[in-house]
Amino acid sequence: MAQQKTLEPSMDPFLKVLRPLVETYCAWFGTSDPHIRSLGLTCSQFDVIVTLGETRGMTCKDLSEKTLVTKGTLTGVLDRLTKKGLIVRVPSREDRRSIFVRLTPQGDAVFQKVFPAHIQYMKPYFQQALTSAEATTLRELLLRLKRSFERG
């Protein structure tokens, strides 16, 4: 019986990507999170507001699919945003079981303030590391890798 040759983790090009990918995420989060908090929001609240920004709103189901907020966390995030007066929940006209979420005028004002501010804060980190063409290529590669994990 022939033995299957395995690569040492230090030699495997796929495993060599894993640690820098995780370290990059951690570095990004460590830079992004404090700035978002300085704007008066949590990352989950920011994600919801940015996702709803410049839309007429969306169902909770669509919101959970378009944000990085887990379904179990979304209700609490929406509760807190409602208490802050930044969103409203409206029963859907098409499906009474469905709730439609949209920004209030105050929520839209927050979106108009925090989204550009955070983009301006984060953009230099990308610009000092990547050209526009490299950013486009990196995006395509990351999306391809994401799809591979989603397919399983």
Image: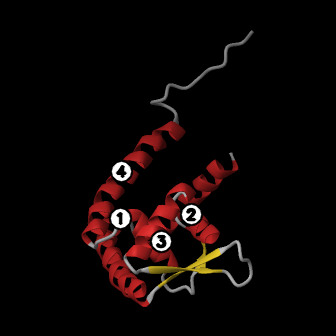
Q: Residue at x 61, y 65 (%)?
A: 65
The x, y position of residue 80, in whole percent, is: 41, 69
Instruction: Identify the secondary structure beneath mark 4.
Output: helix
Q: Residue at x 55, y 85 (%)?
A: 55
Which tag, 1 or 2, sits closer to the chain's start? Answer: 1
Which label number is shown at residue 48?
A: 3
Q: Is residue 39 left or right of residue 132?
A: left
**Residue at image mark 4:** 26
Which tag, 1 or 4, sits closer to the chain's start? Answer: 4
Label 2 packing within 10 angstroms: few (<14), some (14-19), many (20+): few
Which tag, 2 or 3, sits closer to the chain's start? Answer: 3
Q: Nearer the viewer, residue 108 or 127?
A: 108
Q: Residue at x 74, y 77 (%)?
A: 95
Select label 4 or label 2 by which is in front.
4
The x, y position of residue 67, in whole percent, is: 53, 66
The x, y position of residue 92, in whole percent, is: 67, 81
Residue 112 vertical position relative to residue 133 in the rendered view, above or below: below
**Residue at image mark 2:** 140
Instruction: Identify the secondary structure beneath mark 3.
Output: helix
Q: Are marks 1 and 3 in contact (CB under 8 Å)?
A: no
What amino acid type should be assigned to the residue bearing mark 4? Answer: Cys
Q: Nearer the viewer, residue 102 or 46?
A: 102
What amino acid type should be assigned to the residue bearing mark 2? Answer: Glu
Real-space Cα separation, disc 4 to disc 2, in angstroms: 21 Å
Label 3 packing within 10 angstroms: few (<14), some (14-19), many (20+): many
Select label 1 or label 4 by which is in front.
1
Quadrant assignment for the C terminus: top right
Q: Are marks 1 and 4 in contact (CB under 8 Å)?
A: no
Q: Is residue 81 visible?
A: yes
